[in-house]
Image (tube, rainbow, N blue to C red):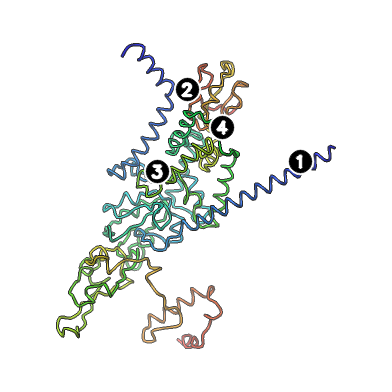
Amino acid sequence: MADEQHMNSRRDALKTMFRGAGLLGLGGAVWGTTAVKLKASDVVLRPPGAINEKNFIKACIRCGICVEACPYETLKLATIDDHTAIGTPYFKPRDIPCYMCPDVPCLPVCPSGALDVKTIAKQVNELLTDTPDINRAQMGVAVIDQEACLAFWGIQCDACYRACPLLGEAITLEYTRNERTGKYAFLKPVVHRDICTGCGLCEHACVTEKAAIFVLPHKIATGKVGAHYIKGWDKADEKRLKNLKENNIKESSPEDELNDWEYLLEDD
Amino acid sequence: MTGNTCLRMTNIIKRNRYLILRRTTQLGLLILFGGANWWGWKFLMGNYSSAYVLESFYLADPHAVLQTFAAGFVMSADAIIGGVIVLVFYALIAGRSFCSWVCPINMVTDLATWMRKKWKLTKKESFFTFSRKTRFWVLGLGILLSPIVGVAAFEVINPITILHRGIIFGFGMGWAVIVALFLFDLLLVEYGWCGHLCPLGAFYSGVSRFSLIKVKHDVEKCTMCMKCFGVCHEEQVLHIVGKKSGFIKDECSNCGRCIEICDDNSLKFSIYNYKI
């Protein structure tokens, strides 16, 4: 009798244990998948000095002090409606762009390290200082829809070019002949992605109904040549390839490894 | 005012003195935080996740810092030190007071509880019941999930932060989460969120075992009227009442309702005596 009771209680204990583990698994699975979905945030622009998106999502404590430090009310905290991790700061340049304050007030107040001065530190004699240089910010990169851009129609509009805080550097105007009219050249805006900070003043200034120039995160707006092509006429590009090889040596797949032409590089 | 109504008013205030104080701190903090965003005040910038106090130092939610650490990111010194300050304050001094003196969700769930009492919904009218220990599992699961999903797992669904961020910075559809939580407490489970599920409450309960400020019970004065059991949100912590003198421990959030309701003066705030 006593034995039977003992067995029963042990069976009950096991049952309770398995049920508890099951419930924990259920909760964990639902919670985990929700969390993964909720943190997805590819098409969102972060404040200047933000560390890479994957770490930013982890690091940001969602306090909004950067939002309050911004004098232009550029930054907003994501709500449940926005397509990014809830509570993290972002901005929409068409509404309010980043005016690129020289002292970057949103950055030093960040307590968590999600905004890190190291990412945009001012360089003096090739040495990094601990003051931010807003011109080194990489919030995103401006992209032009040539079909909607008036300058590509032949109408003279240089709104984005004039609005750019890095005038003549991040956006330049390319003069080409207008065959249709035979007079008045095209003045086509060209974005230089290494210089563009993604502040969005161009997007804000664009005169078309929906902006023909707009800022996208680097990850989405930029392509990547990879190791298969090289500017043979450019020493700097050869260096790029070398760096690429050194950095990617572990993660490259067998197909990517040692192509026929690589011995050419080793001659250098 | 006649002397009679005056006396009654004084009595009401005395009966709700801690409630009034709690609502004052809760709303006061919200206004200070809100003022920073709405009117540019510099007293208390940010929100309850992390606050920039008088533009001189930071406070941070230690639970959020811990989750972030679990997710694989070590925060800057500002947030870590801020987290330690808050942790030490609650763990060594104030106990689980965050829940009933600071947390804005407390006002939502208290409203649900108040309406339950008005409508005379008893515990039996809960749709289902589950253990009050569940919150400790939620706490553990949140820490465990953080490295798996690569983000502070509770922070992406945290209704507390949805509420205060909503009030300070704008809700979006976030208010629906708060309505859901309110209805959960009102219709499904008595004390459902704060008393059963919230991992932050579990966190502060867990660390505040030796906090200084605790409610002290004097069994000599107790007449066993059981009124304190009627108002307490964490009944299980009152297990010593009427049996022996001592300190109320565990999940007690120092709300002080039991002290106000007690006609016998057998419960009062006191400094924890480590020898007992």
Q: Are marks 3 and 2 on the same chain?
A: yes
Tags 3 and 4 in contact by the CB under 8 Å rule? no
Percent x, y of residue B6: 35, 15
The residue that mark 3 highlights is B164
The one nearer the camera, A206 or B267, is A206
Q: Compute the Cα span from label 1 to label 2.
A: 44 Å
In the picture, which quadrant includes the N terminus of chain B?
top left
Identity of the residue furthest to the left in this view: A183
Which mark lies nearer to you, 3 or 4?
4
Q: Compute the Cα span from label 1 to label 4.
A: 29 Å
The residue that mark 4 highlights is B123
The one nearer the camera, A234 or A140, is A140
Q: Compute the Cα span from label 3 to label 2.
A: 28 Å
- Residue at position x 39%, y 86% from top? A232
The one nearer the camera, B95 or A57, is A57
The first of marks 3 and 4 along the sequence is 4
Judge the density around disc 1: few (<14), some (14-19), many (≥20) Cα neighbours within 10 Å.
Answer: few
Percent x, y of residue B69: 51, 52
Percent x, y of residue B194: 51, 38
Residue A241 in the image: above or below residue B219? below
**Which amino acid lies under the numbered mark 3 shown in the image of this protein?**
His
The residue that mark 1 highlights is A9
Q: Is residue A52 left or right of residue A19?
A: left
The residue that mark 2 highlights is B260
Image mark 3: chain: B
**Residue A167's quadrant in the figure?**
bottom left
Which mark lies nearer to you, 1 or 4?
4
Judge the density around disc 4: few (<14), some (14-19), many (≥20) Cα neighbours within 10 Å.
Answer: some
**Which amino acid lies under the numbered mark 2 shown in the image of this protein?**
Glu
- Residue at position x 55%, y 36% from top? B126
